[in-house]
Image: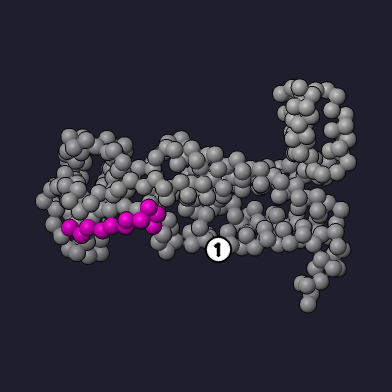
Amino acid sequence: MVTTGLRLYRLILRTYPKGPRREELYGTLVEKGRPSLREAANLIRWGLRARLGRPRSRMVVVVATLVALMAGLFTAAMASRLAVEVSPAALPDAAQLTGIQQVVSPGAQDVEFVRADGVLVQDVDQVTYGSAGYRSRNTAETRDRTAYLAGLQTRLRADGWHIDETYLDDERMWLDARRGSWLMSVETDADEIFVDPENARPLGVEVSRVIPRWVDVVAAAGVLPGLLIGWLLTGWVSRRTEHDPGASARVKIFTAVAFVLVSPNLGQAAVMFGGSMLGGSSWAPFWAPLIYQYELGLLQVAGTVAALAILLDALLAGRGVSRSWAWARR
């Protein structure tokens, strides 16, 4: 019992940074035997706080929390990316896609079939899941969007599809449905909105894979190592620069700059991650906004440079400002 208690205390006290405080606590607690849950939680809480240094600062806790959440989002993205690669369902083949076309738009003309068979497909500025579908010209049926939507829902339900969502206005109609391992989106626009209506293909159908829920479970589990890494890395930077006024000031500036630069796309990814965890379907992975080609991606690149500057400054801290930044003046 005593040996088990000592091992537990030794393990729990690893949340504290190395130093006399850790050994002092261990020496005090070794006589207590096995720690209670409340005592263990309290020790972990204060150990993680001690990792941050700067005992009088509340802001360092806020920064560490934000960095931990951001790091958790990145590790969740990596976990999701790996999981998706081993969970692909087959897209409809040519015959199946022709069958879908006969249900969705019988009598369609000038049908152009398109495919992107990869599990993930990266375009110029976005990442989407692989898909198969077609585009065609409007027919007399699809031009009457109200009647077409009603008839389409009836045909799809008869073919085993579940209707998720529909939309209809004066110029556009779309419908989302699912069946088995497939998601389907159907949309059509009024001919009048095109510059060249005669050659336009307003009717579009896209079928992609349903991503299994276990992929979301893997992504959620992937948050945990990121939270720990983000917190510990913030603590390392904070303690390294705590007693170097110059480095501390620069780190605060770089941290503010990095937060401002990466927040737009990280915020969008966080919202998409939340939707994914709640079971929402999507045509793109939640981490799509994190690639540098995405909209405002260059801001992320600049934010990454600022983060690297923080790590470099922390690495050189304690050697004196003149020595730490001597390379910058060469």
The reply, left or right, for residue 41 in relation to residue 323 is left
Q: Would residue 30 be visible to someone looking at this image?
A: yes
- Image coordinates of residue 122 in percent, x first then y, are 41, 59
Please tell me which residue is depicted at 15% across the width and 60% down the height of the picture: 110
**Magenta span of residues:** 111-121
Q: Would residue 275 be visible to someone looking at this image?
A: no
User: The N terminus lies in which quarter of the figure?
Assistant: top right
- Circle 1 sits in a helix, a strand or a loop, which is it? helix
Residue type at the position of mark 1: Leu
User: The C terminus lies in which quarter of the figure?
Assistant: bottom right
- Circle 1 packing at 10 Å, graded few (<14), some (14-19), many (20+), is some
The quadrant where residue 199 appears: bottom left
Please tell me which residue is depicted at 86% across the width and 68% down the height of the picture: 322
Where 327 sits versus 106, above or below?
below
Based on the picture, tell me whether residue 161 belongs to the magenta stretch. Answer: no
Please tell me which residue is depicted at 81% across the width and 66% down the height of the picture: 324
- Image coordinates of residue 42 in percent, x first then y, are 76, 29
The reply, left or right, for residue 76 in relation to residue 179 is right
Q: Mark 1 points at which residue?
A: 298
